[in-house]
Image (cartoon, rainbow, N blue to C red):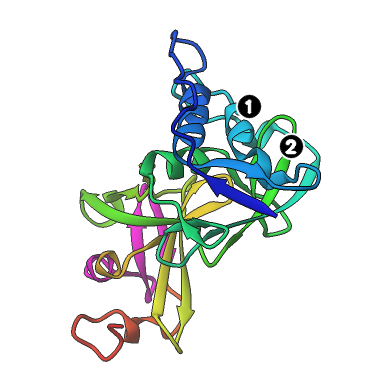
Amino acid sequence: MLQISVDHTAPRWRNHGRNSKADAAARLMTDETRLSTSAGPARPADSLAALIARAGGGDGKKPPVDRWNPPFCGDIDMAIHEDGSWSYMGSPIGREALVKLFASVLRKDEDGCHYLVTPVEKVRIRVADAPFLAVEMHSLGQGDSRTLTFRSNVGDVVAAGPENPLRFRLDEENDGLVPYVLVRGRLEARLTRPLLYDLAELIEEKDGVPGVWSGGAFFPLPEGALGGTERGGADQS
């Protein structure tokens, strides 16, 4: 059975200016949440630190996970919850830096599943809804000249437009209108409820269809969506 133990005697890593992201990942995983097995062969979850370290990316850019085609190495007990928090084997991953490192090698494939990907392996994790949350929005301009820029809970900043479209889902039972913005690849960020209310104030009509302008593109709302976007309404859970 996999066990997580804290090893306070683990050696410290030195950063010599090369592969700094890989070194940081290895240092965080070794110092804070070292993984070990009490019996049996190694499983994908045993090598989380190595998985991130192999991603490289020491130049500060996100690893090019969309260009990698490694073999599938199984599932690990890691989850991204609806509130944007991450957990491993049921325990919260509280280190923001560690969450960002995992997020940097996250990919959603055509099968709709989410994977942590390196050049040599990929492992599947669970995602309750969207992997990220949009927690801040900035609006510049008016009407069809408006640009909406979003910041995610893991530090991504994207301007909504043709390459990063807004998408709306209608969930009448729970949340009413649920907006998303594409961050990269197939990975989306779900707008928080306060941002939904801010976005609702920017709704305009084009040819009689309500929607939102950003980056020169018009993103229509689904039919019947306006009933769940008003402040102070019944749908504020």
Q: Residues within 10 Å of mark 1 (few under 14, many from 20)?
A: many
Residue at 57% x, 39% y: name it: 105
Residue 207 highlighted magenta (yes or no): yes
Q: Position of residue 72 (x, y in %)?
A: 79, 45
Q: Nearer the viewer, residue 89 or 133?
A: 89
Cα distance between the residues tagged 1 and 2: 10 Å
Residue at 34% x, 58% y: name it: 213
Q: Position of residue 144 (x, y in %)?
A: 30, 54
Earlier in the chain: of badge 1 and badge 2, it is 1
What's the amino acid at mark 2? Answer: Glu
Compared across the picture, whether 196 is left or right of 47 comes to left
Could you say which disc has been placed on residue 167 in the image? Answer: none
Q: Position of residue 90 (x, y in %)?
A: 53, 63
In this view of the protein, can residue 75 be seen by the observer? yes
Could you say which disc has been placed on residue 54 in the image? Answer: 1
Which span is picked out in magenta? Answer: 197-220
Q: Nearer the viewer, residue 195 or 204?
A: 195
Could you say which disc has been placed on residue 121 in the image? Answer: 2
Q: Mark 2: which secondary structure?
A: loop
What's the amino acid at mark 1? Answer: Arg
Q: Position of residue 15 (x, y in %)?
A: 43, 13
Residue at 76% x, 48% y: name it: 39
Quadrant location of the C terminus in the rendered image = bottom left
Compared across the picture, whether 108 is left or right of 187 comes to right
Q: Mark 1: which secondary structure?
A: loop
Q: Is residue 62 above or below residue 182?
A: above
Q: Is residue 100 above or below residue 178?
A: above
Q: Residues within 10 Å of mark 2 (few under 14, many from 20)?
A: some
Labels 1 and 2 touching (C-beta < 8 A): yes
Residue at 50% x, 36% y: name it: 29
Q: Nearer the viewer, residue 93 or 181?
A: 93
